[in-house]
Image (cartoon, grey):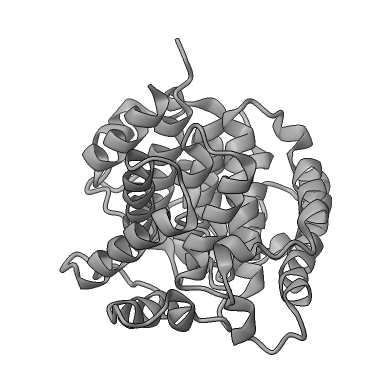
Amino acid sequence: MPKQSATGALLGLALGDALGYPAEFKTVPLIESAFGPWRGLELPRRALVSDDTQMTLAVGRALRTALDRGDVTPEGLEGPLRAAFVEWYRSPENNRAPGGTCLRACELLTDQGRTWQDASQTGSKGCGANMRVAPIGLAPGLSGEQRAGAAQLQAALTHGHPTALAASDLTAHAVHLLAQGTDPAGLVGRLRSYALEHRTHYDHTWLGDLWTRAQDPGPEHFIARGWDECLEILGRLQEAVRTVSPETDPCLATGEGWIAEEALATGLLCFLLFPEEPVTALRRAACTAGDSDSIACLTGAFAGAWLGAGAWPADWAERIEYRGDLLALATLWDA
């Protein structure tokens, strides 16, 4: 039976989100006093998710619309993305502690006379940029250039900081590699090579004149700032995978995940500590002092892309919020 990477990744993302959501903003001792030892964390009966899953679905729907209309191009994706983000912004269900950058940018995106570059918050590299990017790593038939461009564009509509763009590109690339069967043991090395290869490549086709909104002397300088911050944290991650005890809070090694490159690194660390134990990886990610739901949703996306739909307990997968919406996208891409 095929492993169904898209189903595994999207369900894993939502399960991590729901497991980490009640733990967000709490210290590890506080989480364990409220919910018990981390290795026994249970999915809440009502498995509600945060804005992380809601915005992942927005990206997924926009990507599906672009694919239905033909080739994925900057023009073909920007309109559906913008519409999906504005719909999320106006939704009565947008009451799950959404990030300030997403709210500010989406409010500006409601003005159809404004270019998306003028709505982008170029000073922000919050994890909202990449907690939602997994669908772009999962959709079949995209070229490497389309995957990278689409990952950066979906980030840039809200979070225009170069590190947000690079971290989103790397997150989608990691999901794609794992879905394709790349051995987790070699993953960080592959990501470092990818970052070095793209370090000074500013994609004008996908980003337009976004770089001019920052203070950089040129587009290559702008984008290199982002890749350099990602390379630095990938170095820390490589060391942490070898040396960190699973019993200590992963945030101590690779950061609390409020910003994009830390969410990528700490989400990956939790997965790489337990590559064949996806539920344990999710529990470790949820019991962290940082942005627990975003860290755990990325861990779930990585583990699910690698192991497929069979990674998750059936009774968990059956009660996750938005299950029907997640499966509609996943089934299409696994077919």
Name the image quarter holding residue 252: bottom right
Give the residue displayed 57% in from the left and 31% down from the top: 179
Could you tell me residue 208's position as x and y percent? 57, 71
User: Is 283 placed left or right of 93 in the picture?
Assistant: right
Identify the image quadrant of the C terminus. top left
Give the residue displayed 79% in from the left and 64% down from the top: 200
Name the image quarter holding residue 219: bottom right
Q: Nearer the viewer, residue 19 or 80?
A: 80
Rendered view: 316 above or below 197: above
**Furthest-left residue in view?**
92
Report if residue 38 is visible in the image: no
Q: Nearer the viewer, residue 191 or 52?
A: 191
Rendered view: 26 above or below 72: below
Could you tell me residue 266's position as x and y percent? 64, 56
Q: Nearer the viewer, residue 254 or 132?
A: 132
**Furthest-bottom residue in view?**
215
Count the marks: 0
Give the residue displayed 29% in from the left and 34% down from the top: 327
Rendered view: 10 above or below 78: above
Give the residue displayed 83% in from the left and 57% down from the top: 235
Could you tell me residue 84's position as x and y percent? 29, 60
User: Is 25 placed left or right of 277 in the picture?
Assistant: left
Report if residue 294 is visible in the image: yes
Could you tell me residue 28's position as x and y percent? 54, 63
**Furthest-top residue in view?**
1
Rendered view: 82 above or below 240: below
Name the image quarter holding residue 242: top right
User: Is 42 placed left or right of 276 in the picture?
Assistant: left
